[in-house]
Amino acid sequence: MEVVIVPDAKEGGELIAEAMAALLRRKPDALLGVATGSTPLPIYEALANKVAAGAVDASRARICQLDEYVGLPAGHPESYRSVVLREVVAPLGLGADSFMGPDGAAEDLQAACDAYDRALAEAGGVDLQLLGIGTDGHIGFNEPCSSLASRTRIKTLTQRTREDNARFFDSLDEVPHHVITQGIGTILEARHLVLLATGEGKADAVAQTVEGPVSALVPASALQLHPHATVVVDEAAASELKLADYFRATYAAKPEWQGL
Ligand code: PGA
């Protein structure tokens, strides 16, 4: 696992957007797995700026979703389908036909989850999967004690995650209890995992993810099992890492051509 400590969220966003741009230059129809929440927004802004400036052509990029709320009415502005279309797909100049996600309104939710796992495989697999991290260590919506081998399925949110996400809704009561999420096993199939964490509130989860044991109690620690996982953190999110100086020195000595 590579850990890159950046001064702030904007630089983290720029660094990751450049890695995505480099991927699109190599593979113009790359399948990009995107995450929701506040953290990845600087990535999407930086990537859209690169596209607008002509630094990369994203016209053949394909975008796929990591997780989704269950039970929100179709078209709800906080459904993750709406968020991804608004924050990622439209700013990149793509249409909804470039996008795939699980159907959180399906009558048979488990069939929709299975269909999504199949669709990801049939699309050739995810080339680069962006991840945020919950204060409880979740990735996607894989809450603590999710199986490390899990596939896309229905999960119940912890009270902590519902409280963390209440800021996107008018009240805590409106935050759904149930979600669909790519499983940890599904996420680990992506060719490159890139987790961005910013702010002091993520410091403990980041330290457990990077330096703690691999444990279902900290779902993000499954990144230790992936051959190409990159964790980008700002100084605040890095504040509990024992090996911070080592990570800084390693990255400072890395040849630029290697990218992430
Ligand atoms: P956040 O969410 O970026 O809004 O903090 C991260 C997550 O829950 O994965």
Image (spheres, rainbow, N blue to C red):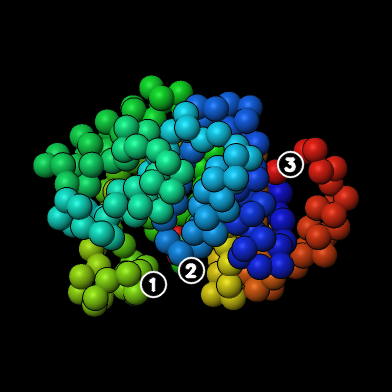
Task: Answer with left or right where residue 250 lies relative to residue 98.
Answer: right
| Vertical position of residue 45 compared to residue 103: above or below | below
User: Residue placed at 27% from the left, 31% from the top?
Assistant: 115
**Circle 2 sits on which residue?**
135
**Quadrant of the image where one finds ligand 1:** bottom left
**Circle 3 sits on which residue?**
259
Residue 37 placed where, x, y %?
42, 61
User: Which corner quadrant of the image does residue 259 belong to?
Assistant: top right
Task: Answer with left or right where residue 243 lies relative to residue 209.
Answer: right
Q: Amino acid at mark 3?
A: Gly
Q: Amino acid at mark 2?
A: Thr
Mark 2 touching mark 1, by CB under 8 A?
yes
Q: Quadrant of the C terminus?
A: top right
Q: Is mark 1 within 8 Å of ligand 1?
A: yes
Distance Cα–Cα, label 2 vs label 1: 8 Å
| Vertical position of residue 183 compared to residue 167: above or below | above
Distance Cα–Cα, label 3 vs label 1: 33 Å
Q: In front here: 21 or 176? A: 21
Task: Answer with left or right where residue 212 lies relative to residue 104.
Answer: right
Residue 133 placed where, x, y %?
50, 60
User: Residue placed at 88% from the left, 50% from the top?
Assistant: 253
Q: Is residue 237 visible?
A: yes
**Circle 1 sits on which residue?**
164
Q: In front here: 117 or 5? A: 5
Which label sits in the foreground, 2 or 1? 1
Mark 3 touching mark 1, by CB under 8 A?
no
